Amino acid sequence: MQNYAYFLGCITPNRYPGIEIATKKSLSEFDINLLDVKGASCCPAPGVFGSFDLWTWLVVAARNIVIAEEMKADIMTTCNGCYATLQEANHLLKHDANLRNRVNKSLGKVGKQYQGSLNVKHAIEVISDDVGFERIAKKVTRPLKGLKIAVHYGCHFLKPSETRMHGSVERPTVLDDFVKSLGAKSVDYKDKPMCCGAGGGVRAANLEIALDMTAEKIDNMVDAGADCLMTPCAFCHLQLDRGQVELNEKYGRKYQLPVVFMTQLLGLALGMDARALGLYDNAISTESFLGKVP
Amino acid sequence: MPSILKRQTIREGERDFVNEVIEHGSRIFPKDDMATLRACIQCGTCTGSCPSGRRTAWRIRQIFLKTLTGLRMDALAAEDLWNCTTCYTCQERCPRKVKTTDIVRTLRNLAVREGHMRQDHAKVCQLVFKYGHAVPINDDVKAIRKRLALPEVPPTVHQYPEALKEVLEILEVTGFRALVERKE
């Protein structure tokens, strides 16, 4: 049994709780126990609050890390944004004693001290490294045969590569390998590594630009014949799911590509009930996709 | 003589603003990383890689040119500065290893200090000042959580008011609330 401090962030628990339950259910099948990070706040978002004031961004991030440090567990996230903030803050603080002292001075005012005692991981890493695709393939009871999945990586799991260290950012393979281990096919599509459009405060202040990027991504996935798209990030998930509804409502488009989170897909392949995995709680209906699941 | 004076003025500005950006970014990032700003050769690989620049007037190469030539207010007041999604594609591809995206975040920090925060962004900050979440819970999602057998309110600051108090105190201590509310 391995424990992780499951850092929820904002979008997972407050918009897509299906991601939260699917992650807990599917990982528990592999003896991974997810603990509550009690009293955690917004991570805070790297391209939003990091764009306003990096100092505040760092101190709030450090407070979130400290809660997990007190639990003596590594952090796991299901959002590239939370991962980016906590992984980067942890990296900066571990490598700069002077910065650590300054941050601890501010944290001291709320009775907290950053130690630098844990690692921050994305659920992708827990699934690929701690569990492993061979073990997953063996445990699959409902192989997703014949399903064509458009994998979306998002930006901040992989980049900046110097800090993240997950290999190629232009041609990553980890999520494609994951999809294959479930028996499905990962379809190649144009501009696969492209951003969903939401980051950096663009969704909040320039929605039409964010949606234009989303439309390009969805078009490319549909052109490749995808039955659904899969995300590893709650914020990309929101942008690609709700963004389709926004495009339909604002611009009269007819987008309806189902959006599935990676642990929801895992849960399905392990034989779990789609409703219990939150697959009926998206903005865009997942029924066309679920109808094709063997 | 006037032409010499003009030239000296620009040089002075160049040095001051480039130093200001490097110093400001170095509060958080390693100084060597921020100093990569000086290595920019204006090749345009960044703009050529930019998904936002494909559909907007945002030109990241241009903001670096403005910065390097000391056009401080031009760089900081640029509306397009806020069209970057921080995808890091430019930073990954830069042949001079300039920390482009992190320098953009630093320029935005300076822009906010000059009062160039967007109303929509100030609203997001207000949500954090109230709830500790940029995207707080609502009744619809509470109902979904209940149906999925999750606690109706997640175990975050939403469930622990004393934890929210800590976060709000940090936002005071770092001067963030004053920074945002001064501009509203």
Image (cartoon, coloured by chain):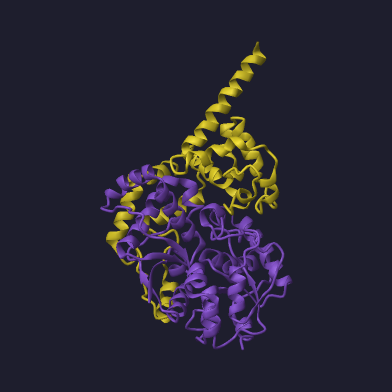
Q: Is residue A72 left or right of residue A185?
A: left
On-image quarter of the N terminus of chain A: bottom left
Shade representing chain B: yellow
Q: Residue at x 56, y 82 (%)?
A: A137
Q: Is residue A183 visible?
A: yes
The x and y percentages for residue B19 are 51, 31
The x and y percentages for residue A192 are 67, 64
Q: Residue at x 59, y 30 (%)?
A: B70
Q: Residue at x 45, y 77 (%)?
A: A27
The residue lying toward the viewer, choosing from A265 and A44, is A265
Q: Is residue A262 left or right of residue B93?
A: left
The residue lying toward the viewer, choosing from B2 and A194, is A194
Q: Is residue A253 visible?
A: no
The extreme front residue here reads A134
In the figure, the purple chain has which letter? Answer: A
> In which quadrant of the rendered view does residue A224 lie?
bottom right
The x and y percentages for residue A287 are 60, 83
On-image quarter of the C terminus of chain A: bottom right
Query: Looking at the image, is B29 positioned above or below residue B141?
Result: above
Q: Residue at x 63, y 42 (%)?
A: B96
The x and y percentages for residue A198 are 57, 58
Q: Is residue B10 left or right of residue A106?
A: right
